[in-house]
Image (cartoon, rainbow, N blue to C red):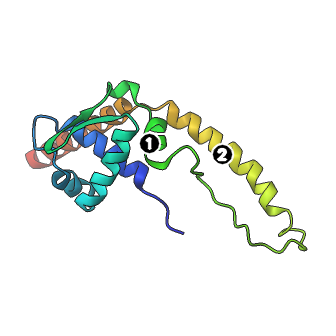
């Protein structure tokens, strides 16, 4: 089973919009180059983000922007916009042998544990803002640049 990257790609897109606003054209092609995906995927995700109330777009213009301040957008808000409220983080195989002790009880058992894990993950994502991600990106970039300067001066 392939794990979805819609959440991480959507966070990437929002960070790109904020960091590169006014510096480069915010086209789906430019964003796709950073995400290393197709512009079609970027447009699809941006549509979900727009419908989720996280970005504002102007048809025909490469001028998308956050719909509210980055510190008011949680990673859980982004998750809900691109994955929807009914999407589960974990899937349980429904095709098990009901006459087997394990097969007959594994779904109900895992459902309990998976629900606990999902609740914890939702709470964690709700406590992290897009601004937290942006700040971390910029700190890491400053550290890289400082390391490069150090290495080039040696």
Q: Residue at x 64, y 39 (%)?
A: 119
Ranked by sequence position, the earlier of labels 1 and 2 is: 1
Q: Residue at x 83, y 70 (%)?
A: 103
Q: Disc 2 designates what residue?
A: 117
Left or right placement of residue 34 versus residue 1 in this view = left
On the image, the x and y values in percent for residue 106 come to 80, 62
Could you say which quadrant of the image residue 11 lies in?
A: top left
* 10 Å crowding of disc 1: few (<14), some (14-19), many (20+): many
Instruction: Depth check: give the residue in front, 127 or 27.
Output: 27
Residue contact between numbered discs 1 and 2, judged by CB atoms under 8 Å: no
Dot 2 falls on a residue whose secondary structure is helix
Left or right placement of residue 79 versus residue 25 in this view = right
* 10 Å crowding of disc 2: few (<14), some (14-19), many (20+): some
**What's the distance in space between the residues labelled 1 and 2, CA to CA?**
20 Å
Q: Disc 1 designates what residue?
A: 81
Instruction: Depth check: give the residue in front, 103 or 60.
Output: 60
On the image, the x and y values in percent for residue 132 come to 38, 31
Left or right placement of residue 134 versus residue 128 in this view = left
On the image, the x and y values in percent for residue 39 come to 23, 58
Could you say which quadrant of the image residue 149 lies in?
A: top left
């Amino acid at each position: 089973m392939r794990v979805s990257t819609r959440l991480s790609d959507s966070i990437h897109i929002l960070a790109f919009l904020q960091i590169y606003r006014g510096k480069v054209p915010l086209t789906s092609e430019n964003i796709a180059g950073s995400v290393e995906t197709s512009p079609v995927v970027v447009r699809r995700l941006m549509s979900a983000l727009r419908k989720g109330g996280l970005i504002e777009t102007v048809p025909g213009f490469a001028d998308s922007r956050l719909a509210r301040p980055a510190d008011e957008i949680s990673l859980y808000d982004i998750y809900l916009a691109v994955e929807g409220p009914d999407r589960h983080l974990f899937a349980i195989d429904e095709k098990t042998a009901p006459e087997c002790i394990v097969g007959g009880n594994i779904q109900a058992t895992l459902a309990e544990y998976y629900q606990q894990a999902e609740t914890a993950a939702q709470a964690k994502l709700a406590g992290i803002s897009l601004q937290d991600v942006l700040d971390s990106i910029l700190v890491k970039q400053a550290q890289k640049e400082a390391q490069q300067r150090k290495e080039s001066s040696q």
